[in-house]
Image: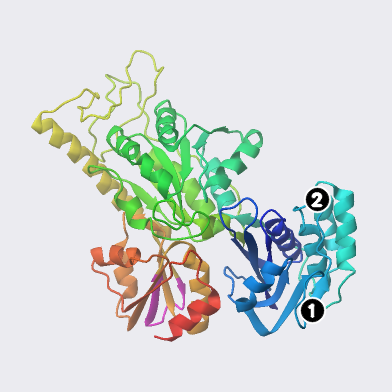
Amino acid sequence: MELNIIIGGKAGAGIKEAGRMFARVIANLGYYVFVDVDYPSLIRGGHNFVNIRFSDKKIMSVKSKADIIIATDGRSIRAHEKDAKEDTVWVINEKERREGAIRAPFKEVAPGFFKSSSVLGVLLKLLGIPLEEGLPLILSLPQKEKNESIYREAYNSVGEVYKIRKLSEKKRELLTGNEAIALGAVDGGLDIYVAYPMTPASPVLHYLAKNKNELGIKVVHPENEISVINMALGISYAGKRSMVGTSGGGFALMTEALSLSGMAEIPLVIYEAQRAGPSTGVPTYTAQSDLLFCLFAGHGDFPRIVLAPGDAEEAYFLSREALNLAWKFQVPVLLLGDKTLGESIFTAEINREKRVEKPKLWNGNGDYKRYEITDDGISPLAFPGTENITVKVTSYEHDERGITVEDAFLVKKMQDKRLKKAETIRNYMINEDYAIKIEGNPESKNVIITWGSNKGVVNEVAEETGYKVIRPLILEPFPHERIKGEIGRAEKVIGVECSASDQFIRLLSMYGIRVDANIKKYDGRPFYKDELKSLIERY
């Protein structure tokens, strides 16, 4: 059983809320669901829609063509004609006209707001789902009496088209990637989250701020991104675990302080949620075009770690891992996502577990050297307030105590220390089980190589076309030897990415990994399953 549904309407009319509530109902019935949210950077007046796909088997993508289109206004009818099939069921506002469409009372609770109740009522009745399944969600809304009345009227205004049965009593968990990142960071020991709002990372700030007391953390919203990263570095210097969140434009402002983190060896986690650029670009849409920027941002040579989750479950795990890695190695760790990962709604099974690894701490013996040279390049940590020692960090080149130096011998000596740490990081990271994931048909001679939020759509297409999928979750240090080993004697290697300038393929080529073709999309939208399958089959 599988259906793809599009719900469209004007910004501010509760379209996203309607999608969220429907996803919750269908997950409560035991189905897997994936929701892609499409909206312009307007508070009011634009066209919003959600693309929802659900199935009795695991899915993590949507299709371009819909089985049902819910058009709550005239603009939605025109906007989604291209998304219809011959047998698509259309449901339109009772004030509109379209031949063969079902008309329904998409009423508003207040002018311009909350059509979500009527949409949910119509949709559940079309699918033959009992009214009672959606009632708890309706009663949780503001003006619940008015919402319940509208919901019941809408439910009774249409007939059944499908009959969706309950699969199990197990209610599947729903999470956005941003919510998973927030929870992973908390379970990795996050003390303070610092961020300036920037789509599509802003929901992490909102979620953590709303739940800060329950989660036991502090949340700070400074005046700009430069303040954000410098405040976070100060927090880490003082001994508390910090994390920042932003998108490409905000990260651009943070790059000087990124290099400060590298020189001063201050632990820091940066969540960089990509959107379509350059500059302001298309703020509410997706891309994978910050890849090379994140790998090489900052001036000078210093080690960093870059992680790239593909879904909500990996977002939770790698966010938690990022906090521990930053403190283990005293380096900046970038968690690289995008709008598709962050704002899509996933059916996810996350077993939350607090895991906070202790970093290398000073044992209290002898003189304290903040940048003591060690066999692995990692110096013992101490924090301000520790008796009888000075904890000095600096942006200048320095000796082991943190005193500024310019002597050629000492400059090279300290750079070699950081290079030794980079070697330690590489030896540790490339052997991690999660460095690369092998999915699809592992025995196939046809290979798709991809990264990040393409995971779901690529894996679904690979299952149907018989391809092997190689997907690195660690992008720096890059596990190129393992990737080469998995490619082996493949007869065909196809890259898949959301970048106009082949950034992922350029990364592969740096390590001598070649592909036969590269499928790329850069219009701000994710790959749709039917679209990608058609493109793959051309090869």
Please name the residue that numbered disc 1 is placed on: 162
**Relative side of 19 to 230, left or right:** right
As for residue 22 lying within the magenta part, the answer is: no
Quadrant in the picture for the N terminus: bottom right
- Considering every residue shown, the one lying at the far top of the view is 388
Badge 2 or badge 1: first in the primary sequence: 2
Residue at left 22%, top 22%? Answer: 403
Residue at left 41%, top 82%? Answer: 444
Are there few (<14), some (14-19), or many (20+) residues within 10 Å of tag 1? few
Residue 139, given in percent of the width and then of the height, sits at: 84, 51
Please, what is the three-letter code of the amino acid marked with disc 1? Answer: Tyr
* Residue 110: assigned label: 2
Residue at left 41%, top 28%? Answer: 234
**What span is in magenta?**
439-449
323 vs 283: above or below: above
134 vs 535: above or below: above
Residue 350, given in percent of the width and then of the height, sits at: 60, 55
Estimate the spatial distance between the alpha carbons at disc 2 and disc 1, rounded to whole Å.
31 Å
